[in-house]
Amino acid sequence: MRYDPRVPAQLRLANPDDAALFVALVREGFAGTRGYPNPSSALDETEVQVRAALERDFGIVARLHGDDVGSARFRLEWARPPSFDEHEAVRAAAAGHAVTDSPGGRLFFSRLTVLPRARRRGVAHDMIRYLSILSLRCGIDTLAITVRSQQPDNRPLWQHLGFEITGYSERYGIDDMVTHMQRKL
């Protein structure tokens, strides 16, 4: 399917019943990492594991012309425990309402993927804009992500979207396998 690059992605909150969809999107979207010495662990996640993650935390799904083309998972990392139910707050934020008394913090997202056929259409940008809006409505002013350093396009993509490198960490015995990035809103 050809996607019109002028049409923004439609975004919605995911629910645990979207676990099979997330597994399919991530497997196709992350398939390119199979060629790396240490492929993404996202490729090994099961529907049961993803369902549990979506019950505990949150996710979003991106659509173009009625076709599911992207997804991401996220969690809220509060500066102090909130006085409200965070699941209710995120649902309210998705409906356009803002939290009035937020403890602040950051929204950490992961497993963001866009299917190869939908890349370079602004889907990742639309997803970041949506996560930014949810963050601000929840009283959070920072987006954070960790990316695999071995993927040559990862850091430049996120830097282009306004993220700054805040550090590196080890994985698989490689000192800088993971790049930590964030963006103030």
Image (cartoon, grey):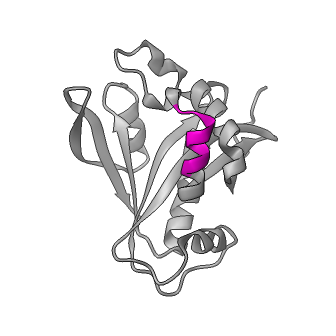
Q: Nearer the viewer, residue 127 or 51?
A: 51
Q: How many marks?
A: 0
Name the residue at 62% across, 51% down. 60
- Name the quarter where the N terminus is drawn: top right
Residue 125 seen from this side: no
Name the residue at 34% across, 15% down. 37
Q: Nearer the viewer, residue 177 or 125?
A: 177
Q: Is residue 86 above or below residue 40?
A: below
**Residue 162 in picture, x, y percent from top left:** 39, 51
Q: Residue furthest front?
A: 48
In this rendering, would 130 be left or right of 179?
A: right
In this rendering, would 112 be left or right of 94?
A: left
Q: Residue furthest bottom?
A: 101
Q: Is residue 182 above or below residue 120?
A: below
In this rendering, would 121 be left or right of 82?
A: right
**Residue 123 in picture, x, y percent from top left:** 61, 42
- Name the quarter where the C terminus is drawn: bottom left
Residue 99 shown in magenta: no
Q: Is residue 149 above or below residue 125?
A: above
Q: Is residue 174 above or below residue 129?
A: above
**Residue 184 in picture, x, y percent from top left:** 36, 62
The boundaries of the magenta stretch are: 45-53
Q: Nearer the viewer, residue 109 or 133?
A: 109
Q: Nearer the viewer, residue 15 or 180?
A: 15
Residue 143 seen from this side: yes
Q: Main secondary structure of the magenta part?
A: helix
Q: Quadrant of the rendered structure where residue 33 is?
A: top left
